[in-house]
Image (cartoon, helix red, strand yellow):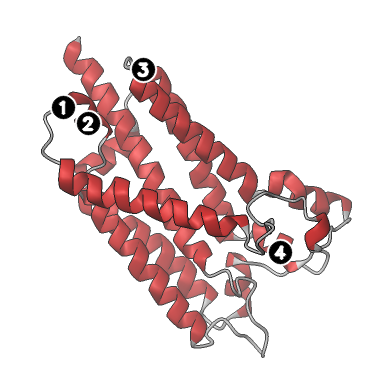
Amino acid sequence: MRSSIFAKWAVGHRVEAHIVLPAAMSLVLMAMYFSGNAYLQNLVAPTMKTMPFYSAREFGALEMLQNFLLLCICFFSIRCFFAASNLSVKLVALLLLLVSGFTFLEEIDYGAHFIEYFTGQNTTLALETWDRNWHSKTGPMGVQNVSYMKVASRIVMLAGFVVGPLLLGNSRHPLIRLLLPSKWMISTIIVMVLLLMFAHRLDDAGYSIISGVHGNLDKNISEFGELNMYYLLLLYTALLYQRLIARKIATQ
C-alpha cells in the first residue's frame, strides 16, 4: 500500500497541518461571510431564488467543504481498515467509517436538496412532517437531536484529543501508541474553539447583516466549528493510516 501525500506532509509540517491550515481555511471563509459584501457572503452560504434558505446554503463553499472533508475521512477510514492487521484497529477504522458516512448523509439531507434543486419541489419546515434528516428532528422533550450529538462530539473531542494524549502520551502499549492522537491535536482543538468564539462575536456584532438582512448562517454559526471538527478527524485518520503504513514497512 502507498503512503498518503497529505499524511506525509502533515507529519513533516506539524505547525502548518495542525494550526495554520485549519485556521487559514476558517478565516478565509469567515472573512468572506462577514465581509459585508453580498457576493462574497453568497459564495459561503448562498441565497437562491428557487430554493428555501435551508437548502440553498447547502450549495455554499462552507457546506461543500464540510462534505468534502467527510468523504476524505471515509476514504482514509477504508484505507486504515485494509492496512490494519490488528482486529482492534480494524474495528476503530470501521467505526470511523460508519460515523463519517452517517454524518455525510445527514449533512446532505440524504440528497434532499439536490432533488429540490432539480425538481423545483421544496419541502416544508413543519416539525410533524420533518423527514430530511435525523439530527434536525425534535424529540418528545422539545430538544433537537443535534443537541445530543453536539454534547457527544464535545466529550469525544475532550476525552480523545485532549485528555487522552496528556494522560497516555507516554504509554508503552503498542496499540495505545498507534491509536492515540498526537499531542499536536490539542493545538488544533484550541484553534477550533478560538475561531468559533471569534465567529460568534462577529455574528453578534452584526457583521453578517447586509442591507438589514441576516446571512443564511443566522443561528447556525456553529457550522464554522463543524468544519474544523471534520478537519481534525480527517487529520487523525490520515495520520493513523500513515502510522499503519510505517509499521508495515518496518516489519518487512
On screen, 236 above or below 217? above
User: What residue appears at the point 13 percent right and 34 percent down from the top-left corner?
Assistant: 171
Kindly report the distance in space between the C-alpha atoms of the residues bearing marks 2 and 1. 5 Å
Mark 3 near mark 1, Cβ–Cβ under 8 Å? no
Q: For the residue labelled by badge 1, is the local secondary structure a helix, a strand or a loop? A: loop
Q: Which residue is mark 1?
A: 173
Outermost front residue: 141
Name which of mark 2 and mark 4 comes first in the sequence: 4
**Labels in figure, total:** 4
Name which of mark 2 and mark 3 comes first in the sequence: 3
What amino acid is found at the position of numbered circle 1 in the picture?
A: His
Mark 4 near mark 1, Cβ–Cβ under 8 Å? no
Q: Which residue is mark 4?
A: 54
What amino acid is found at the position of numbered circle 2 in the picture?
A: Ile
Give 144 or 232, whichever is nearer the viewer: 144
Label 4 or label 1, whichever lies nearer to me, is 1
Kindly report the distance in space between the C-alpha atoms of the residues bearing marks 2 and 3. 14 Å
As drawn, is 123 to the left or to the right of 227?
right
